[in-house]
Amino acid sequence: MVVDTQWSAWNEEIAVQVTEGAALGPAVALVGAVLSETEAACSLQRGNAEIHALNLAQGLPVRVSVRLAGLLRSALWVARMTDGAVSPLAVEESPAGVPPIHPEPTFVDVQIDDATVLAPWGVSFDIADTAKADSADRAAALVAHELECGVLVRVGSVVATAGHCPAGGWQVPVPGDGAVELRTGTAMATVGADLTYGGHDPVSGEWEQVTVMADDSLWAYGAAAASIQRGVGAVAWLEQQELGARLVDRFGRVYTTCGWSHPHAA
């Protein structure tokens, strides 16, 4: 029997499902604690978030918490895996008509040594989206380990699972396409064309919506967000990554990769 609940936090709808009724309350507490810790580390909407000190450093090394260092590493990993299509950096642009003095910095210029971060002058970090995906993975693994049950954690449109699978599998809705069944230990993320990652304007391109399944939420989100950025080349790229994906173009036409099928999509 699966029991569930949902609430709002960090501008997202949070949902938790567990396979043991008695585990629901403790699971909610564990998930809430993970999200609170992450939000305190990197939410740009919080004036006391730790990430503000990092963004104000402008070329100076900053010692950060272990949690923020881990979230930055996750964001940089996504940037590497997507060849920079999903970058955690918002770069300060030169005034119109004024050529830049130095080459524009990228994610490869960021250095993290233990918990000390050194980023180039002129950049700031916006890692909220990858941090939410990272937190979904972290929270699901924590609940499964601490409470010894199956669990599904959804943060917005990002889903992570862990522990043993319920009878009938995890039924996860796909916007505009019913539901798919995820096996335990797999994840799914949906990204729309209103993506504003890293402080950039929403993308106006080929895809209105991309849903990706992967082994973890971080990669599912990263691949979906990169596909929005990649345009028509996204389907071939997703096939190369051997990811199950469903893409909807701006005319409502649906494309899927070989790894996407119903009813057992993963």
Image (cartoon, rainbow, N blue to C red):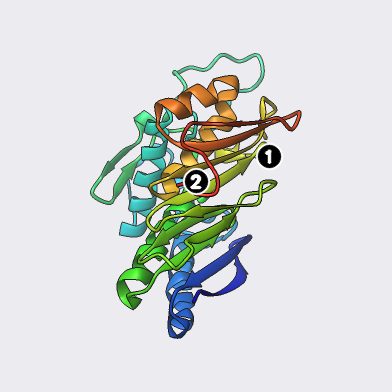
Residue 176 in percent (x, y) is at: 70, 46
Left or right: 85, with 251 as reference point: left
Residue 60 in percent (x, y) is at: 36, 41
Q: In the depicted view, which residue is nearer to us: 111 or 210?
A: 210
Residue 230 in percent (x, y) is at: 55, 24
Q: Do the residues labelled 2 and 1 touch (CB within 8 Å)?
A: no
Residue 191 is drawn in which quadrant? top right
Which structural element holds mark 1?
loop
Disc 2 marks a residue whose amino acid type is Ala
Residue 148 in percent (x, y) is at: 32, 75
State which tag comes first along the sequence, 2 or 1. 1
Q: Which mark is residue 265?
A: 2
Disc 1 marks a residue whose amino acid type is Asp
Residue at 53% of width from left, 26% of height from top? Answer: 235
Residue 93 is drawn in which quadrant? top right
What residue is pinned by disc 1?
194
